[in-house]
Amino acid sequence: MSVRIGCGLSTGPDARIAAIEAGTDARQALEGAGADLVIVFCSGAHLAAPEETLEGVHEALAPAALAGCGAGGVLGAGREIEGGTAVTVWAAAFDGGGRAETFHAHALPGRQEGEIEVGGMPSAAGASATLLFPDPYSFPADRALAELALTAPGVPVLGGISSARTLDGEAALFLDDTVVTGGAVGAVLHGVEILPCVSQGAAGIGPVLEISAVDGHVIRELDGRPALETLREAIEGLSRHERELVSGGLLLGVAIDGAHTLHGAHDYLVRGIIGADPEGGTITVGAPVREGQVVRLHTRDADSADHDLRSALELRSSALGGSAAGALVFTCNGRGQNMFGAPDHDADAVDEELGGAPCSGFFAAGEIGPVGGENFLHGFTATVAVFAGAG
């Protein structure tokens, strides 16, 4: 099948007119084909009139399916608008049987007191991918990912946590022709080739260590010795430059069992070290871990993040023979100029590595994407859904 993708970006002050402008630009690349799926992200004045934004997009594109959310900043047409008013519209035409099924998921009381369950999630078994845009206050994204792992194992989930709300303090989520005020929206894609790309922006340093005693998130022993003592020795063995990098906050990469990069190294899930107990000699990490897993210190800085993103994108582009049709980009709101010291970094990287393929996205309050075949919620990460072209 083949996929045609277009995107548009407008920073105009009028919500409806700006949405029409961005939608019209996106429509040009479809070459007269109908929009099977439209994704919309908006910020600033659009959050005061989200219904007008949605009306403008429908006027320009009349999409068969639509999803999206409000954001603190958006990405599109090779630019990053980190503040102020902007709307980015991404449109795709699927030829040869591809389709998108949009959904609205919501939180439900569990069977036991204090439990939360998820309702409204469609069946994603056998799908190409699921796009997910949750509201951070009214929807348990981690719980939804756990449910999808059971009902649709191996199906990649990509997206981001909405990073802005309406002036009334409600969620700003878009679902077809409706503004949804809570929960999560998204789309299940069938028959569409997607290569997920997750750049955690971190580089491994120091030795690889094995967890030899653990209790949930608390690592008691590494390589058969007290974890804190072993970690201190690993840090002491780093170069001066590496010690300076980790001084801003320790990160630990937890190897995903059985998952390796194309170069044979472990595929790591990077999480923060959130506590240490000198008396007990333990460390606490921001992810559940198991005995026998291997871990390694990681550092995150602008150079590591740039190299990691470009390398990951280059692999996907090579796998597609340089013919990516387009991409959706979900980058952390802690990246951008805060991390790189210059505007448009992730937008430029995606544009250059994917050969100018149309891309849209937003600055998220948490990014969703797979590592080692398992879907996770990340921070300071860029996750990218790379769409294949003609196949």
Image (cartoon, rainbow, N blue to C red):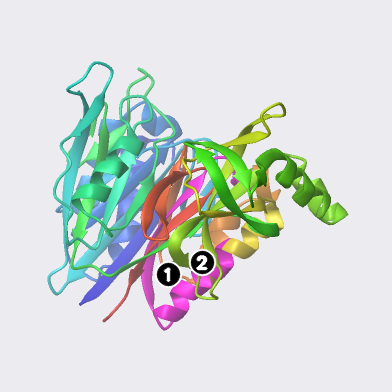
Position in image of residue 42 (x %, y %): 39, 40
218 relative position to 104: left or right = right
Q: In the displayed image of the protein, which residue is found farthest to the front?
A: 224
* Dot 2 amino acid type: Asp
Q: Is 384 rendered above or below residue 112? A: below
Asked if the residues shown at circle 2 and circle 1 are in contact, with their CB atoms under 8 angstroms apart, the answer is yes
What's drawn in magenta, residue-wise?
309-337
Q: Which mark is residue 108?
A: none
Tell me, yes or no, whether the highlighted magenta stretch contains residue 69: no
Estimate the x, y position of residue 46 in percent, counting from the top left: 38, 33
From the image, tell me which residue sits under label 1. 357
**Quadrant of res 96:** bottom left
| Quadrant housing the N terminus | bottom left
- The answer to whether residue 371 is seen in the rendering is yes
Asked if residue 365 lies left or right of residue 244, the reply is left
**Lower position in the chain sequence, tag 2 or tag 1:** 2
Amino acid carrying mark 1 in the image: Ala
Mark 2 Cα shell of 10 Å, populated few (<14), some (14-19), many (≥20): many
Residue at image location 47% in from the left, 71% down from the top: 356
Residue highlighted by disc 2: 351
Q: What's the distance in space between the residues labelled 2 and 1, CA to CA?
A: 6 Å
Q: Residue at x 51, y 36 (%)?
A: 217
Q: Quadrant of residue 352?
A: bottom right
